[in-house]
Image: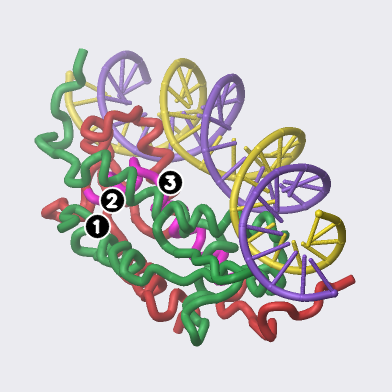
Chain colours: A green, B red, C purple, D yellow
Amino acid sequence: MEQEVECCPSGLSVPLASDDAAELARAFDALGDPVRLRLLSMLAAAPSGEICVCDLVGPLGRTQGTVSHHLKVLGEAGLVHGERRGKWVWYSLDRDRLAALRDAIEPARVASEAG
Amino acid sequence: MEQEVECCPSGLSVPLASDDAAELARAFDALGDPVRLRLLSMLAAAPSGEICVCDLVGPLGRTQGTVSHHLKVLGEAGLVHGERRGKWVWYSLDRDRLAALRDAIEPARVASEAG
DNA sequence: TCGATGCAATGACGTTCGTCAATGGAAAGG
DNA sequence: CCTTTCCATTGACGAACGTCATTGCATCGA
């Protein structure tokens, strides 16, 4: 039944655990959309480090509802943080989280050692 | 009709162009799946730097067809490279491509300057 | 040449995603 | 209090995704 060992010893295991992979995948999936990447680029380029939602809608060419949706996705992935200040909500990058993702795709490791 | 400038000067633009965002998004989207991340982790941990498909199927708990599909996605994203060697196909990481992605999410820039 | 083996490609099915229009809710001003 | 403005949420729809079963194709051994 089992197809025996044919090409390799087959003693291989998966360095990255399923749970860790799922969490990482959620974050990268949040980065896997052009609108969200452009959104992040705007936040990264903001001199003050934060931007009001009303200024994100126009340049992106998307509805306010759509932009809000993407901000929610980014927020749930821990990539951005929104703060209500009076009448408007200001969003800023979570640079630590972004740095963690960057480390996860270190070519030599690819998240095999999260710590 | 237009809602005038209310909270900000609104002179903002999007640092990351649509085309660049689309290409980057395709790559990150390829990373946005647990199976693919675990697949990459196996490739990254391989002593020889490459693994035969037949050794990827078992540990991942997915059908051969499914694994092949994910490898195709990763290949189209430029993250892995497959080479037929006799009877089997061996896959290896594209570490340069991975490094480029890592640089793209530099917290201070977020791909605003690709070069 | 023939059969067996391993990877890739295809079709199908259910789920998730991206988008918009419409609605809801909080905050400032008259 | 009522209106306006702005952001968040919901519902709906089409498109894309992840998975599997099946089929196709190339390779190796007899």
The label shown at residue B40 is 2
Q: Is residue B87 visible?
A: no
| Contact flag, marks 1 and 2 (Cβ < 8 Å) | yes
Residue highlighted by disc 1: A110
Q: Chain of mark 2?
A: B
Residue highlighted by disc 3: B72
Mark 3 and mark 2: Cα distance apart in space: 13 Å
Q: Chain of mark 3?
A: B
Q: Is residue B96 above or below residue B92?
A: below
Span of residues in magenta: B19-41
Residue B30: percent from left, percent from top: 43, 52
Between A89 and C21, which is closer to the camera in this rendering? A89
Give the residue displayed 40% in from the left and 58% down from the top. A78
Q: Chain of mark 1?
A: A
Q: Residue farthest to the right?
A: B1
Q: Is residue D19 left or right of residue A83?
A: left
SS for dot 2: helix
- Quadrant in which the N terminus of chain A is drawn: top left
Residue A11: percent from left, percent from top: 10, 35
User: Crowding at label 2, few (<14), some or many (≥20) Cα neighbours within 10 Å?
Assistant: many
Q: Does residue B30 show up magenta in the picture? A: yes
Q: Is residue B34 above or below residue A74?
A: above
Q: Is residue D12 left or right of residue A92?
A: right
